[in-house]
Every structure is written in C-alpha cells, then in structure tokens.
Amino acid sequence: MKTYIQIQALVFYTAIGFLAAGCGKKSATRPEASGTQQNSQTAATAPEIDAALFERITVRVNSLIQQKQYPAASETLKQLDNVKLTPAQQSTFDSLKAQISK
C-alpha cells in the first residue's frame, strides 16, 4: 500500500512538473510567425493611417476656414505637404488651398 501511494505521488508531482515547465515555455516559431503577421498588418494599415491623417487635417482646416482663421488653416494644411495623396485627396487639398488664398 505504501508503494502504491508513493507511485501516485510520483505520477502526480511529475505531471505537475511537466505542466509548470510547459507554462513558461514558448514555441520558437510562434514569435516569428506573429512578427511576420504584425509587419504585414503594419504595411497594410499605412494607407489607412494616411487616410485618417488626411481626414483629421481636412476637417480641422475646414473648421478654421469657417472661422476665417486663414493663417492657422494654411499652417495646418502644410502638414500634408510631404504626404503622398490620392487623386481625390489632391483635389480636396487643392480646393482647400484655393479657399485659404481667397
């Protein structure tokens, strides 16, 4: 009977040891795979970030134009000088610039 209890304890503690060792261990391929996925997500969202930036700036410029704060609108619009714009964005940019120069 004593041997049976010792074997059960040994099995129990061995199982606990394997579980504890496995909890802190990470797969070597896991971080690389997620890193690759993260890089592709970053590249995919870059145009979306530019679109969001464009949207925020144009909303702000429109607000400043309505308040007749043309110098502030012009300075705000300058933030888009080095951003690659789509043809539609370029049209909006040119329209805002024309409104400021009136």
Image (spheres, rainbow, N blue to C red):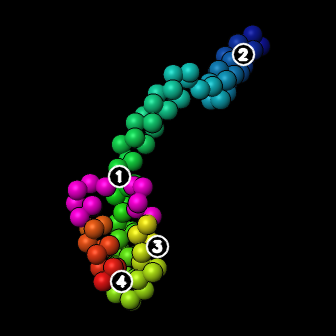
Per the image, label 1 sits on a secondary structure element best described as loop
The Cα–Cα distance between marks 1 and 3, rounded to whole angstroms, is 18 Å
Q: Are marks 2 and 3 in contact (CB under 8 Å)?
A: no
Q: Position of residue 20 (x, y in %)?
A: 67, 27
The answer to whether 69 is drawn above or below residue 40 in the figure is below
Callout 1 touching callout 3 (CB < 8 Å): no
Relative to 25, does residue 94 appear above or below in the rendering? below
Crowd rating for badge 2 (residues with CA inside 10 Å; few <14, some 14–19, many 20+): few
Does the residue at mark 3 contact the one at mark 4 (Cβ under 8 Å)?
A: no
Residue 28 in picture, x, y percent from top left:
56, 21
For the record, the magenta segment spans: 79-91
Q: Is residue 78 above or below residue 67?
A: above
The secondary structure type at the circle numbered 4 is helix
Q: Say what amino acid the circle numbered 1 marks.
A: Lys
Question: Furthest-front residue in view?
Answer: 101
> Which residue is the site of mark 3?
75
Q: How far is disc 4 from disc 2 in space, using C-alphas?
A: 78 Å
> Total marks drawn?
4
Q: Earlier in the sequence, mark 2 or mark 3?
A: 2
Q: Kindly identify which residue carries mark 1.
A: 84
Question: On the image, numbered disc 4 is attached to which residue?
Answer: 65
Judge depth for marks 1 and 2 and give the one in front. Answer: 1
Q: Is residue 2 left or right of residue 50?
A: right
Residue for badge 2:
10
- N-terminal-most mark, 4 or 1: 4
Residue 95 rendering spot, x and y as whole percentages? 26, 72
